[in-house]
Image (cartoon, rainbow, N blue to C red):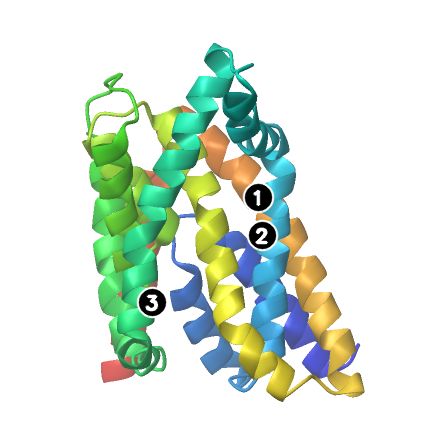
């Protein structure tokens, strides 16, 4: 197998797994790209591996997403039942949760891009992610309903997770649980609210992709990365849902701390 193709598959798998597992996709992509000397994978590769993870979350939550799409039309036609009303609220919550990330992405885009090459930032933020996942084990199980303030709180967590090494899924799930929402509801909402965030990341890069389209030679690598990220993302979601049900998020916390410790040791030794 061509070495560059193998690297593309590895990065696709890393993107798919870490986009949803609470260990930070951006952080791991910085680390793995650095280790593989594959730092110039290009805009096209980034766009398509993100599309792969987007496809994964849509497949897993296709029923919820379909009902969320139908809910506004049911409300307009006056045929909304209790289920439609509940999903209409989820539409509102997703919009609210997306606003902080949109603001951060638009206002601080240039500043944020400059830190994506810093492995020290990644290792530092992995410590934060690791501690949050370990603390999540001790959060009391409550049954607060998801509402606008709690959705917005998860949205601010998602916005902060634009920092490499700070997990998007881990941050949103931790904040949601800390606010008292049932962990399984929090997990479902965290994945669904990732859809506009991932789509937004793709849209921001479309202009660059059009101005610098991929070459024919790189198309195979891009396609392999897309398939790898979609498949690994699908299984990552299924795995994390099961781990959250069993309250085992601390496993990822220990992993993040170990990776961070190794990274600091290698950097400063």
Residue 233: % across, % down: 58, 50
Tell me which label, 2 or 3, sits earlier in the chain.
2
Q: Taking the image as drawn, is residue 157 in sight? A: yes
Quarter assignment of residue 229: bottom right
Tell me what residue is drawn at x 30 percent, y 26 percent: 146
Q: Is residue 87 above or below residue 24?
A: above
Label 2 vs label 3, nearer the camera: 3
Q: Residues within 10 Å of mark 3 (few under 14, many from 20)?
A: many
Residue 19: % across, % down: 48, 54
Which numbered disc covers residue 105?
A: 3
Q: Is residue 107 above or below residue 194?
A: below
Quarter assignment of residue 249: top left
Q: Is residue 7 above or below residue 177?
A: below
Mark 2 residue element: helix
Is disc 2 in contact with disc 1, using a CB cutoff of under 8 Å?
A: yes
Residue occupied by mark 1 = 57
Which numbered disc covers residue 54?
A: 2
Q: Give the side of residue 130 with respect to residue 187, left or right.
A: left
Residue 203: % across, % down: 52, 67
Quarter placement of the C terminus:
bottom left
Is disc 1 in contact with disc 3, using a CB cutoff of under 8 Å?
A: no
Distance from Cα at disc 2 to Cα at disc 1 = 5 Å
Tell me what residue is drawn at x 53 percent, y 40 percent: 237
Comparing 185 with 121, the one in front is 185
């Amino acid at each position: 197998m061509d070495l560059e193709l193998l690297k593309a598959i590895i990065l696709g798998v890393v993107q798919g797994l870490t986009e949803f597992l609470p260990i930070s996709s951006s952080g791991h992509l910085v680390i793995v790209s650095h280790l593989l000397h594959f730092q110039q994978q290009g805009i096209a590769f980034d766009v398509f591996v993100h599309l792969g993870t987007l496809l994964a979350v849509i497949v897993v939550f296709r029923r919820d997403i379909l009902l969320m799409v139908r809910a506004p039309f049911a409300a307009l036609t006056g045929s909304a039942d209790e289920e439609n009303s509940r999903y209409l609220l989820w539409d509102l919550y997703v919009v609210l949760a997306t606003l902080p990330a949109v603001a951060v992405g638009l206002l601080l885009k240039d500043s944020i891009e400059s830190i994506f090459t810093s492995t020290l930032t990644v290792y530092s933020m992995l410590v934060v992610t690791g501690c949050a996942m370990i603390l999540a084990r001790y959060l009391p199980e409550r049954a607060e309903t998801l509402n606008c303030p709690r959705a917005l709180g998860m949205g601010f967590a998602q916005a902060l997770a634009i920092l490499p090494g700070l997990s998007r899924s881990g941050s949103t799930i931790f904040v949601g649980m800390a606010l008292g929402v049932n962990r399984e509801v929090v997990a479902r909402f965290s994945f669904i609210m990732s859809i506009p965030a991932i789509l937004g990341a793709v849209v921001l890069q479309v202009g660059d992709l059009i101005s610098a389209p991929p070459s024919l030679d790189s198309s195979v690598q891009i396609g392999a990365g897309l398939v790898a990220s979609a498949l690994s993302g699908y299984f990552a979601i299924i795995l994390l849902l099961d781990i959250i049900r069993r309250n085992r998020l601390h496993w990822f916390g220990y992993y993040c701390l170990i990776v961070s410790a190794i990274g600091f040791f290698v950097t400063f030794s």
